[in-house]
Every structure is written in C-alpha cells, then in structure tokens.
Amino acid sequence: MRLTLYTDYALRTLLYLGVHADRRVSIREVAEAYGISENHLVKVIHHLGRGGFVDTLRGRGGGLMLARPADQINVGDVVRHTEEDMALVGCMSPLSPGMGPGSRSAVAAAGGGGKRASLAALAGSAARGTFSPRGMAAGGATSAGSAAGEGRSGSAGECLLANACHLRGVLGEALGAFMTVLDARTLADLLTPYERKVLTQAGPAEG
C-alpha cells in the first residue's frame, strides 16, 4: 500500500507546523522548506483546515498554525481524512458512479465518514465474505452493472470469488493492522529531536 502524495504533503505540513508551533507560518514558507509546489499545498492545507487540523488566518499577520496541540492530532485520523480511497483491491473500493474528490472509501464509511473507521469489523466481514462496499450489489457487481445485465460470473467488474473471498479477508486484516499502528501515534510522537532540528533549520533565518 502506498499513501498518496496528497497525504504525504499533509503530514509534512503538520510536522512543520508542529515544530514552529509558537508562531504562524505562511504556505510559501512550508513549500520552500520542502521544495514542493505551493499551488498543490494550498489545496492540501485547505482540506486540513476543513478537517480541524490546521487553523488558517488571512490577511496581515495571518498564516497557519496547528488547530490543536500536536499530542491531540492522531496520525490515523489525518490519513483517513486525506486518503480518498484506502482500498487495497478493487472489491474494497467505493464503486458508486461519479464519486469525486472528498469521497470516502468503504473503510472510512464503516466508521461514519471522516471518523475513525471500525477496521476490525471490516476485516471480520471481509474474512466472512460478507463485506459489501457502498454501491456494490451483494454478488460483487455494482448496482449499475447489475441493472445493465452484468450479474453473471466473469462479467466486467465482478470477481468469481466475490461471495467468499479469503484474500479479501486477509487484506482487510492487513489494512486493519496498518491503521492500528497509525492510530497509536500522534503528531507529537513524530516530532523527535531530529525532525525538530532539521525543520527548525529549514525555517526562515532570524534577522
């Protein structure tokens, strides 16, 4: 599993803000510190603000700060908020037609949208072969596909093993273990002396 660049930028932004928690910083400062696109970062920070992770203030004297202390920002919650689809295989994905940015995977849906997902329940249902992502018919095809007469085994979008797939259960369990590690960490846990030293040096020179 590889997290998206969107999540990478979000976590790096939070790390930078955590190190410079005593002041507001600009988007340009964060972008220059990491050598990344300021335009891309604007979207990421806007999304972090909507999620309650970053406090943004416009105008003179404005800038960015953490919306709450670093030890109250859970890494797993950040990843769920920024990852649009955490499914490891297609049958664990949200399959509703036209789902755009901001849609959540079946993993997140199991936990009530952006809230912490019940991954243990997901892994268990996947292992039993009963896991049915939002928008998927019981046999594993999308509801749109079923309406189009694509309910036969081997048709487009449907796996032969959909009704009792142990692989999906194993992958659900693995995803649960992955998120359990992230849920046990806060942003404060990631701010070791090394991160603090490097990101402090990356900040603007005091003058």
Image (tube, rainbow, N blue to C red):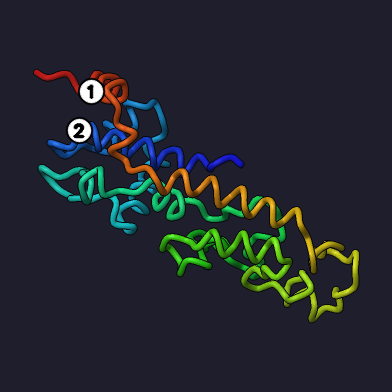
Q: Mark 1 points at which residue?
A: 200
- Name the residue located 39 percent from the left edge and 50 percent from the top edge: 78
Q: Is mark 2 on a helix, strand or loop?
A: loop
84 above or below 132? above
Disc 2 residue type (three-letter): His
Indicate which disc, 1 or 2, sits on the residue closer to the N terminus: 2
Residue 51: percent from left, percent from top: 34, 57
- Labelled pair 1, 2 in contact (Cβ < 8 Å): yes
Q: In which quarter of the image is residue 199?
A: top left
Question: SS at mark 1?
Answer: helix
Q: Residues within 10 Å of mark 2 (few under 14, many from 20)?
A: some
Depth check: give the residue in front, 100 or 78. 78
Residue closest to the far bottom: 147
- The crowd level at tag 1 (other Cα within 10 Å; few <14, some 14-19, many 20+) is some
> Taking 156 as reference, is 183 left or right?
left
Residue at position x 21%, y 50% from top?
68
In the rendered image, which quarter is residue 35 located in? top left
Between the residue at mark 1 and the residue at mark 2, the CA separation in whole angstroms equals: 7 Å
**Which residue in the protein does label 2 denote?**
20
Image quadrant holding the N terminus, namely top right
Q: How many marks?
A: 2
- Residue for point 23% across, 31% down: 19
Residue 195: x and y in percent read 31, 25
